Every structure is written in C-alpha cells, then in structure tokens.
Image (tube, rainbow, N blue to C red):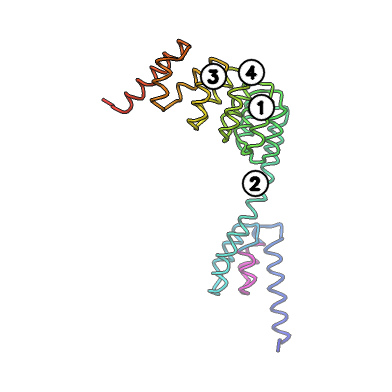
Amino acid sequence: METLHDAEHDAEQAHLAKVALEHDDADTRRDAVDRIIDQPLLAMLALEADDVVVRKIAFAKLTDHDLVLKLARDANEIYARRIETLNMAEQARLAGIAEGQNSVAVRKSAIRQLADQSVLMRLARTDENTDIRITALRKMNNQAAFTELAFSDKDECVRMDAVKHLSSDVLLEKLALEDESARVRNVAIWHIDDQTMLANLALTASRIDVRKTSVTRLTDRLLLTTLAQSDGDEQVRKLAAKRLRDIEADSHPV
C-alpha cells in the first residue's frame, strides 16, 4: 500500500522531470535530472528531452537493465521521427528556394537536394528555364512523367534528357521513328537494348539518320554483312562494314 511518503516522493520526482524537460535555464534542467532516481522517468528523459546534456545525464543514471534495452530499441524510432520532421521542414525550405526568385545556380543547388517528387515534376514541366527543368527531371523517378516529357515537351533538350530516363524499348522505338528532332531520335536509338528492334529500324526506317544510327548499335554479324554488301544506301553500307570491323577487333584484342 502506497504511503504518504511514497506519494510525496513520486510527486517530487515527477516535478523534477517536468523541470528537466521544460525549464528555460539549462543549469536548472541539468540539476533537476541529476536529482532524479526514478528509473522510468530517467528513461523518458533519455529519449525525449530536447537538451542533449539532460539526455546524457539521464541515460548515465539508468541502472534498470530492461529499461536500458528498451531504450536502445525505442531510441532509433524516436530519433528517426525527429530526423523525419527535420527533413520535412528542410524539404519545404528547399522547395521554396527552388521555386523562388533566386539565381539559377542557387535554385539548381536546392533542386539537387529535393526529394519531393511533386515539386520536381512541377519544375520539370513548367519552369521557364531549361537548365532548371532538366535538373529537376534528373531527380525524378516517375516513368509516366518521363514519358510525358519525352513525347510532348516543346523543348528539344528537355525531350532528350527525358528519353535517357525511359526504361521501355517500345517507347524508345516510337520516339526513334516519330520525333521531329534528329538529336532526340539519336538518343532514343542509343538507349534501345532490343536487337530485334534495332534490326527493324536499320532495315525499314524511312529516315536515313535512324537507319545509320541503328546500324552502329547492331551486333548481328550476318545482318551487318548483308547490309554492308547490298544495302541501297552507300553510307549504310559503309557504316555496316565499319561496325563489322569493330566487332571483329573487339573479339580479337591485340
């Protein structure tokens, strides 16, 4: 049965814990935790006190082995939540800089530290500065957004960078065949891995630049030999012959 003395002791310990947590004066906070012997209160202070010295004093005074083990488990979660809160505030600050009226260099630096995909997509889609748009695009991880930019953006440089991030050979082939920019078509071809697609482009594409670039990506020696010997375009024949020589040289290094 709890005695009056016990109740007074508990009340005093709780008051000291409140002082250790909330008092404005650092020395007063630290004196208070130094007077606490209640193990659960010390564990609470070791986890929750904003004052790092209070936390250290509280942890040093813990003698309850089970509480020490629990503290070790819980600390990671609590500190992770604190870091997450700090990161959220930092991300909001960075977004303000990235979208604000700052120099391009400052905005790009902020964008490189941004993790908020919605802010990055907004910048990549709508910012007036091409460098800003491409910097934001390179921090994105959304294939749908890359596809949208690769197919419909008016800025050739933005389309080229978006193409580099596409993971679908089918989409890349479509861009290689349809984009109005030779530079975009070239980048698309260089990111296609499917040899059947590349062979089809080399043989049937209506644009000669698409055929030529595709030939330089082929690995099928029989097809390259056929192209080198009988293709109707002289440049394609020359590129196919050169590609054959390069493959042969790579297979028999000096």
Residue sitting nearer the eye, 51 or 224: 224
Residue drawn at (71%, 86%) of the image: 2
In what element is the residue under mark 3?
helix
In space, the residues marked 2 and 1 are separated at their CA atoms by: 34 Å
| Residue 174 in which image quadrant | top right
Packing grade of label 2 (10 A; few <14, some 14-19, many >=20) is few
**At which x and y percent is residue 221?**
38, 25
Q: Is residue 14 left or right of residue 217?
A: right
Q: Which mark is first along the chain, 2 or 4?
A: 2
**At which x and y percent is residue 165?**
58, 33
Residue sitting nearer the eye, 77 or 148: 148
Residue sitting nearer the eye, 254 or 19: 254
Q: Which residue is mark 4?
A: 180
In what element is the residue under mark 4?
loop
Q: Which residue is mark 3?
A: 210
Q: Which mark is first along the chain, 1 or 3?
A: 1
Q: Which residue is mark 2?
A: 87
Q: Which mark is first along the chain, 1 or 2?
A: 2
What predominant SS class does the magenta segment belong to? helix
State yes or no: discs 3 and 1 in contact (Cβ < 8 Å).
Answer: no
- Figure quadrant of the N terminus: bottom right
In what element is the residue under mark 1?
helix
Disc 2 residue type?
A: Asn
Image disc number at residue 83: none
Q: Which mark is first along the chain, 4 or 1?
A: 1
Mark closer to the observer (4, 2): 4
Q: Which residue is mark 1?
A: 151
Magenta residues (range): 29-46
Residue extending farthest to the top is 234
